[in-house]
């Protein structure tokens, strides 16, 4: 069959650097576009405002220098306010609207200007993009400023007034040229600034994401076996991640070591029964005695295998386990033990903080509580006390835990504390047991990086077993 080519997944997420660079680039482009538009509009409005003020000044100066004849005809200023008003088709035009006609400046000869209407006295107008026809016949646009005025003329015995309006127009050629030059410069500078900022933010993103790349490189080194753990040289934001990875690596390494130790312990435990069977099978012994010996050694090996398998099945320190309430498990264990030791009449008291929680496997909690409380019931005369408190606190970590079991029995002599924590050693050979309970508790507690301490109980006078589990990740 022909092999299929791998399909490209368009939904595959981009790298963090590509995503950040794309988002920042889009934001920068949008910002520059809005800034360019705002600057362009501000420049255009300022230019038009300046145009209005200039045309207004020309109109008032033109009116101030001109006058009217007796027949009402407008007489322009003797000294022109702007030479362009005297040059036909110059682009600057003046028009005076009278009650019975109008007057145009010399520059208005040739172009076709829009007709102006009579304005009320002191009324002002400023109009944009009015259509005009140039001398060359081309269509254009112009700005026009208009002002309504009143002319007063008088003599010794009479006085007359009449309204008139003056308009000053200027085509948009010069202003459009200025706006065009400004826009070219504006977008050239904004484009250059945008390019520089894009390159700068690419460098900044590369620099800011370098710690993540270092984390990835260290993970690859760990995967290839070139490093045993992550280094501690990382920014504060990445420390929880690297610490969790290191904890996971150590947990997996501990699990692997535990499995190897379990196999070694199993092999060592089976060595003796197998050697006995090998030796007995070579001897001339009665069949019944051989059968009894085989049955004894087989049961012993079965017990050893069951114990080692149960020990290997315990996962130990769980990194992300849900918090467990302790009182329900303790209550269940105590109820069972009260039935077994009913003849002793032992009473178990609880002193458990409401907020105390165990972060781990339920089986580990049952293993620790079960062995400690059962040991206390076994040695107590009448009272057992279970104390559970929230342990040490640390920032950004789950809280630690303190569990203590006291009894009013004979206690553990100081010279035997180390012995009772060893596997297979009992505090008193006359008491039934296998000597592995406290050792199992110590193994479980150590898997949570905790400690098991044995001392004299200040409360009840007997033994005091204290488990301290530090804050976890």
Image (cartoon, rainbow, N blue to C red):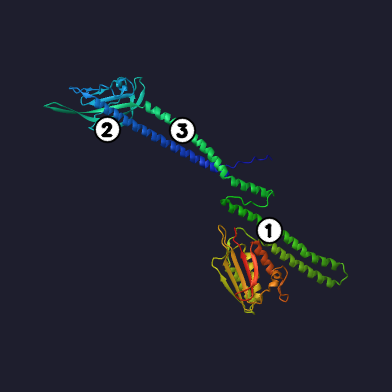
| Residue that mark 1 sits on | 255
* Position of residue 204 measured from the top left corner of the image (x, y, whole percent): 55, 42
Of tags 1 and 2, the one toward the viewer is 2
Above or below for 120 versus 361: above
Considering depth in this image, is 438 or 342 the residue closer to the camera? 438
> In the visual, does 221 lie left or right of 101?
right
Residue 253 visible somewhere in the drawing: yes
How many C-alpha atoms fall within 10 Å of the one at disc 2: few (<14), some, or many (≥20)?
some
Above or below for 136 versus 220: above
Tell me how far mark 1 sits from mark 2, CA to CA.
92 Å
The label on residue 124 is 2
Residue 318, quarter of picture: bottom right
Location of the N terminus by quadrant is top right
Task: Give the mark, 3 or 1, whose residue is nearer the N terminus.
Answer: 3
* Position of residue 383 measured from the top left corner of the image (x, y, whole percent): 61, 77
Considering depth in this image, is 155 or 129 the residue closer to the camera? 155
SS at mark 1? helix
Residue 2, quarter of picture: top right
Considering depth in this image, is 327 or 376 the residue closer to the camera? 376
How many C-alpha atoms fall within 10 Å of the one at disc 1: few (<14), some, or many (≥20)?
some
* Position of residue 322 measured from the top left corner of the image (x, y, whole percent): 58, 61
The label on residue 369 is none
Above or below for 34 versus 107: below
């Amino acid at each position: 069959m022909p092999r299929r080519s791998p399909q490209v997944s368009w939904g595959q997420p981009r790298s963090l650097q590509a995503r950040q660079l794309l988002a920042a680039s889009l934001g920068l482009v949008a910002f520059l576009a809005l800034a360019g538009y705002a600057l362009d509009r501000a420049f255009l409005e300022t230019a038009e405002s300046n145009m209005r003020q200039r045309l207004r000044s020309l109109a008032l100066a033109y009116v101030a220098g001109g006058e009217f004849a007796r027949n009402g005809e407008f007489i322009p200023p003797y000294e022109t306010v702007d030479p362009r008003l005297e040059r036909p088709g110059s682009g600057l035009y003046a028009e005076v609207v009278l009650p019975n006609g109008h007057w145009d400046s010399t520059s208005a000869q040739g172009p076709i200007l829009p007709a102006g209407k009579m304005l009320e006295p002191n009324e002002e107008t400023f109009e944009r993009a009015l259509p005009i026809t140039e001398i060359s016949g081309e269509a254009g646009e112009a700005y026009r400023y208009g002002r309504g005025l009143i002319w007063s003329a008088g003599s010794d015995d009479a006085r007359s007034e009449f309204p008139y309006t003056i308009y000053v127009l200027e085509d948009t050629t010069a202003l459009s040229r200025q706006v065009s030059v400004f826009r070219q410069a504006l977008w050239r500078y904004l484009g250059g600034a945008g390019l520089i900022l894009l390159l700068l933010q690419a460098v900044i993103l590369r620099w800011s994401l370098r710690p993540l790349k270092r984390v990835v490189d260290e993970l690859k080194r760990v995967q290839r076996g070139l490093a045993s753990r992550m280094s501690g040289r990382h920014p504060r934001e990445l420390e929880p991640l690297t610490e969790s990875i290191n904890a996971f690596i150590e947990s997996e390494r501990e699990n692997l070591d535990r499995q190897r130790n379990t196999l070694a312990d199993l092999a060592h435990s089976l060595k003796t029964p197998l050697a006995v069977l090998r030796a007995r099978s070579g001897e001339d012994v009665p069949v019944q005695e051989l059968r009894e010996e085989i049955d004894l050694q087989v049961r012993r090996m079965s017990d050893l295998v069951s114990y080692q398998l149960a020990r290997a099945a315990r996962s130990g320190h769980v990194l992300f386990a849900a918090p467990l309430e302790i009182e329900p498990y303790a209550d269940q264990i105590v109820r069972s033990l009260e039935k077994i030791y009913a003849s002793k009449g032992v009473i178990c008291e609880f002193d458990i903080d409401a907020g105390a929680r165990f972060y781990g496997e339920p089986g580990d909690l049952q293993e620790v509580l079960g062995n400690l409380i059962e040991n206390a019931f076994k040695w107590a005369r009448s009272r057992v006390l279970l104390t559970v408190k929230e342990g040490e606190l640390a920032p950004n970590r789950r809280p630690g835990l303190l569990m203590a079991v006291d009894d009013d029995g004979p206690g553990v002599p100081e010279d035997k504390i180390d012995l009772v924590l060893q596997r297979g050693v009992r505090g008193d050979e006359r008491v039934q047991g296998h000597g592995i309970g406290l050792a199992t508790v110590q193994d479980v507690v150590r898997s949570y990086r905790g400690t098991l301490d044995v001392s004299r109980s200040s409360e009840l006078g007997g033994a005091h077993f204290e488990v301290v589990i530090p804050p976890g990740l």
